[in-house]
Image (cartoon, grey):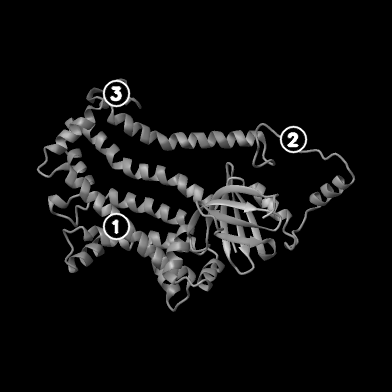
Amino acid sequence: MSENKLRSNGTLKRIDGKKFRGYLEADEQGAAFYQKGKAEPLVQWHYARLHRMDNIRLGGTSTQVTVILKDDSRYILELDQGLKLYSFMDSHWADKPVTPKTRGDELRRLAELRGEKIQSPKKHLVTRRHPNRSIAGDIGIYLMLILVGIMMVFPLVFLVGSSLKPLDELFRFPPPVWPQHPTTDNFSDLFVTMGQSWIPFSRYLINTVLITAVGTFGHLVIASMAAFVLAKYEFPGGRLFFNIVTTCLMFSGYVTGIPNYLIMSRLGMIDTYWALILPAFAAPIGLFLMKQFMEGLPTALIEAATIDGAGRLRIFWSIVMPNVKPAWLTMIIFSVQSLWNTSAATVIYSEAKKTLVYALQQIQAGGIARTGQVAAANVIIVSVPILIFIFSQSRILETMASSGIKD
């Protein structure tokens, strides 16, 4: 490479999904990506080999640059100074396709040739996304969003506040939203009551975690594989099968409870964990959600991987699943919420196999004296789905912002 060259640290992602950390170095002839700790370039190309090059801003200082060569090789680079390197490579790319220019771009070019001073647009303190909407409209929308946010968070705040209230404040009318004298006695009394049970509290917790983890994993794998086949392959009866799945979304769990019980009884799985896990595998919401999302995945991406020699299973795990991450993260939230909150009283009879929700519901049936323990139990029941949603929602938004690949 020549003396005039640029370098930026970052990662390189190949079409098979493998990522490599290192740095990209570019000069007037071409560019090369060096893996961390390696002297020889992992990937190298001259500008004459370029077929297409895209630039996607991710946020902060990092920028994503997608390089597609004439031999259909595709490389996705996430670089600290990607915007600068993209402009440098674009300026030395002699045979690049002609990009359409707007009338404003042409007037700006002619003004620069005449030596005229080009006025830059004024930078406002607040950048408005919809300039054709009035400021009063913006204020009204934000006030409405704040009001809706308060209405949605109020039940959660009241629930947590009730769990911290002493017994005299729990029966006060009108009930205070937040306790005047917060205490954790309700939680300590709850654990004392659970400890007096002839089945240890940890046993209920392990049962619930086992059912939730296995049911969610199986639901994710089975629904994703079925959705991949329905979305990207055509076969006789495929559309009819998906219509049946869509129809199943109309029925709630109360309607399918009796058929599920009869099927599990015929299979001899009543009073086992499988009586809850197997129906979770066949939940229609996961298949519907994954299929609709996979239909937006470019077919050209799968065809390119097939040309490179990747099998169907490799394409599914290494290409399809990473690109539909928002869908399966959302499906995990729904599945965990459904399995964690089930009491399983109709299909599991052994006390040692009961779930945590069932045990807490038995405490709730203890009368007025256990009102504080009931409030603490409600907080424990809703905490896990809420925490999973909090930790997952940021990744869902990040993936939606950075995985928009189009044909």
Q: Is residue 209 visible?
A: yes
Foreground mark, 2 or 3? 2
Circles 2 and 3 in contact, beta carbons < 8 Å: no
Q: Earlier in the sequence, mark 2 or mark 3?
A: 2
Return the x and y of residue 298 as percentages of the image width and height: 55, 65
Q: Earlier in the sequence, mark 3 or mark 1?
A: 3
Tell me which residue sits at (67%, 50%) in the image.
5
Tell me which residue sits at (60%, 68%) in the image.
72
189 vs 387: above or below: above
Q: CA distance from mark 2 to mark 3?
A: 52 Å
Q: Residues within 10 Å of mark 2 (few under 14, many from 20)?
A: few
Q: CA distance from mark 3 to mark 1?
A: 38 Å
Q: Which mark is residue 215?
A: 1
Q: Amino acid at mark 3?
A: Pro
340 vs 197: above or below: below
Q: Give the total number of marks visible in the rendering.
A: 3
**Residue highlighted by disc 3:** 182
**Residue highlighted by disc 2:** 122
* The quadrant where residue 167 appears: top left
Q: Amino acid at mark 2?
A: Lys
In the structure shown, which secondary structural element does the residue marked by tag 1 occupy? Answer: helix
Tell me which residue sits at (46%, 67%) in the image.
315
